[in-house]
Amino acid sequence: MSDPALLFDATPPIARITLNRPDKRNALDAEMVVRLADAWAEVVATPAIRVVLITGAGDAAFCAGADLATLIPLLTRGRPPADEWDERLLAQPRLMNQALLRTTEMPTPVIAAVRGFALAGGTELVLASDLRVVSDDARLGLTEVRRGLIPAAGGTVRLPRQIPRARAAELLLLGDHLAAADALALGLVNRVVPGPEVLACAEELAERMAANGPLALRKIKEVMLRSEGLPLAEAFGVEDDAARVVMRSDDAKEGPRAFAEKRPPRFTGT
């Protein structure tokens, strides 16, 4: 039996996802897509998971995008399904969107830990994450246009919302790579560290985040997603809705109480 294309540790409060095809630069095949969609579904269904950390096996690549030899021919019907993973992906095409988080329904914060290449669908996964820690030799890029394709897993929509439009257009239309230092200068990533330190840095951020109020974490992310692009008055309405839920929670009582008693808070997410 070969190793699964994706490893998933769902132990709360931090779930860990590892893209696990290092010999293929963690390129997305049907198995990885299906397993990734299932992993996100389990995260959503498990409120005790407060943070997700996603990374790639090995040090050469986080994810080199879709496997051009297997996944793209399957999706374009250039080859027939060869196994259960192919069959399930063809039967449930929405799994691709779910796997690449092309949705606003992921309430749990996601941290991407990136070493080496994160190209095409790999960059789209990074764009869908909330915090990004990358190695100093990392290379990002939406390179689909070079293969006659488009970044259809959220890249054409998310990138212009996260960096200046002219730079987004350059990266999308030329398909160029973006060095880690340039990604940091553009505000596209949060931390640039030496390769061996990437996972430890991401873990430290995940642990700090997981210590915060879980309901507050989810509602903050919800407001960020739902209010994007709305007129200011409507955006404040989204914020008000979230604030009402949080202020009625046990966590909103526990946080100030723990501060007054000079002890760590015991949040429950309720």
Image (cartoon, rainbow, N blue to C red):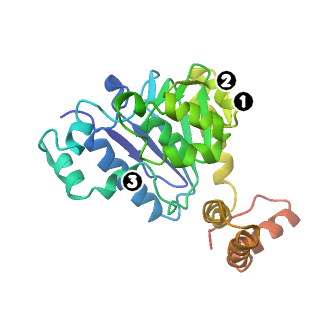
Residue at 61% over, 38% down:
132
Residue placed most toward the observer, 252 or 241: 241
Residue placed most toward the observer, 144 or 26: 144
Give the residue type at disc 3.
Asn
Residues marked 1 and 2 touching at CB (< 8 Å): yes
Q: CA distance from mark 1 to mark 3?
A: 29 Å
The kind of secondary structure element at disc 1 is helix
**Relative side of 128 to 213, left or right:** left
Give the residue type at disc 1.
Ala
Q: Residue 217's image quarter? A: bottom right
Q: Residue 144's image quarter? A: top left
**Percent coordinates x, y for residue 251 in the rendering:** 70, 71
Image quarter in which the N terminus is found: top left
Residues marked 1 and 3 touching at CB (< 8 Å): no
Name the residue that disc number 3 marks.
97
**Relative side of 187 to 16, left or right:** right
Name the residue that disc number 2 marks.
181
The kind of secondary structure element at disc 2 is helix
Residue at 30% over, 33% down:
67
**Relative side of 164 to 255, left or right:** left
Residues marked 2 and 3 touching at CB (< 8 Å): no
**Relative side of 73 to 96, left or right:** left
Name the residue that disc number 1 marks.
185
